[in-house]
Image (cartoon, helix red, strand yellow):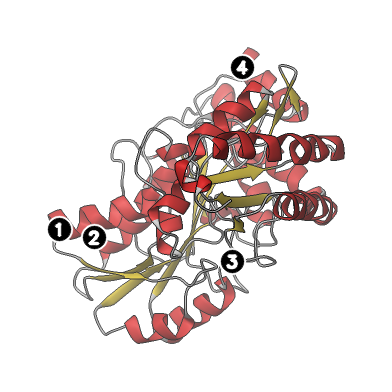
Amino acid sequence: MQINDGIYMDYAATTPMKKEVLEAMMPFLEGGFGNPSSFHSFGRDTKKVIDESREIIANAINASQKEIYFTGGGSEADNWAIKGVAFSNRKKGNHIITSKIEHHAVLHTCEYLEKFHGFEVTYLDVDEDGMISLDELKNAIKKETILISIMFANNEIGTVEPIEEIGKIAKENNVLFHTDAVQALGHLEIDVKEMNIDLMSITAHKLYGPKGIGALYIRQGIKLHNLIHGGAQEKRRRAGTENIVGIVGFAKACELAMSDLEESKKRLTTLRDKLMNGILENIPYSKLNGHRTKRLPNNVNISFEFIEGEGILLLLDHVKVAASSGSACTSGSLDPSHVLMAIGLPHEKAHGSLRLTIGDMTKEEDIDFVIEKLPPIIEKLRSMSPLYENVK
């Protein structure tokens, strides 16, 4: 996608809002302002629109509209799912299972429960592709286990976890299963019933919708402590006047994504593989991070030996290519990615990683441009590295 005469390849961080989404939102910026909790016609009109939007999002994941609760984003949904289950099930147990490569919204929430509320958390290892072991998951479950939280697809390396199998294991052991599907919605087929998912976090800005709006799917019948207290919105489970504009935009973005899911996935996978192979074949001492095939259709993450990722980003930005060295949520940190460390990369290789994520507006010529420009950038950076001098 061309933005400011540049090429945008950071769709995993956020996506541009589609024109159709903005058009759907405009009536509620200009006139549809009624509070959905009000009894008059202004309120009834917006409440109807929210219910319709909830139905659209529910249909995308084979849920009931009664099971969709709007939040301020994916991080809030993760916090609510994990804290809500923990505090609602204390009499049953205090043990939670997650993985070492989760988004920090999950990891930091689990650490908070450990530190301040006495919960025990098992952090599962992953293999070199970022995949959890189902046998290790089974062995980690004990009578005090109340929740398994494993992300659907990793935001850094793109690996897609065996969600249906995890759901089956959780159900067989009478343990609730939460998945962070922020990166998956709009890219992969999701069926919460078939996959035995009890709780799922999603957000709009990863699929060409507005920022600041997300949702938590809560399977009907699950008791969950509230995260935000106040009014009676969201069936008394999430206080705060509804973000009507954001909700409408989320629904429209979801509707567009689902109408084009298979074709988009096929196109992006073709472009992804061309980009992936073009880089690996033209740059020595490079390594793909994440599973080669069981990965998001738009994700390429590669580590380059002997250099720092920040240098790659600066030189790519100089030729007007926007990319990332990992999660946008931790871009201010000097520490290597916890995901890359978990898959076994040493510090020096983890520091030299590049994440390129493509999207609906990415063209084949954009792929060709990056494949052409990246090798000399890597070579230039390596020419200044004493470590590379020793292996040439």
Image-based side of 255 in relation to 63, left or right: right
Q: Where is residue 345 in the image (x, y as percent from the top left)?
A: 45, 60
Precedes in sequence: disc 2 or disc 4: 4
Single out the mark in the foreground, 1 or 2.
Answer: 1
User: What's the mark number on residue 87?
Assistant: 2
Single out the mark in the foreground, 1 or 3.
Answer: 1
Q: Nearer the viewer, residue 322 or 77?
A: 322
Disc 2/disc 4 C-alpha distance (Å) = 38 Å
Q: In this view, does 342 lie above or below 19?
A: below
View extreme (top): residue = 30
User: What's the mark number on residue 29?
Assistant: 4
Please rate how many residues cluster around mark 1, counting C-alpha atoms within 10 Å: few if below 14, some from 14 to 19, many from 20. Answer: few
Disc 3/disc 2 C-alpha distance (Å) = 23 Å
Total residue callouts: 4
Single out the mark in the foreground, 1 or 4.
Answer: 1
Q: What element carries label 3?
A: loop
Q: Would you name the residue on which mark 3 appears?
A: 192
Q: Would you name the residue on which mark 1 appears?
A: 117
Single out the mark in the foreground, 3 or 4.
Answer: 3
Three-letter code, disc 3: Val
Q: Where is residue 202 in the image (x, y as percent from the top left)?
A: 54, 49
Kindly identify the residue that appears in the image at 53 percent across and 56 percent down: 154
Precedes in sequence: disc 3 or disc 2: 2
Location of residue 269 by image quarter: bottom right
Three-letter code, disc 2: Phe
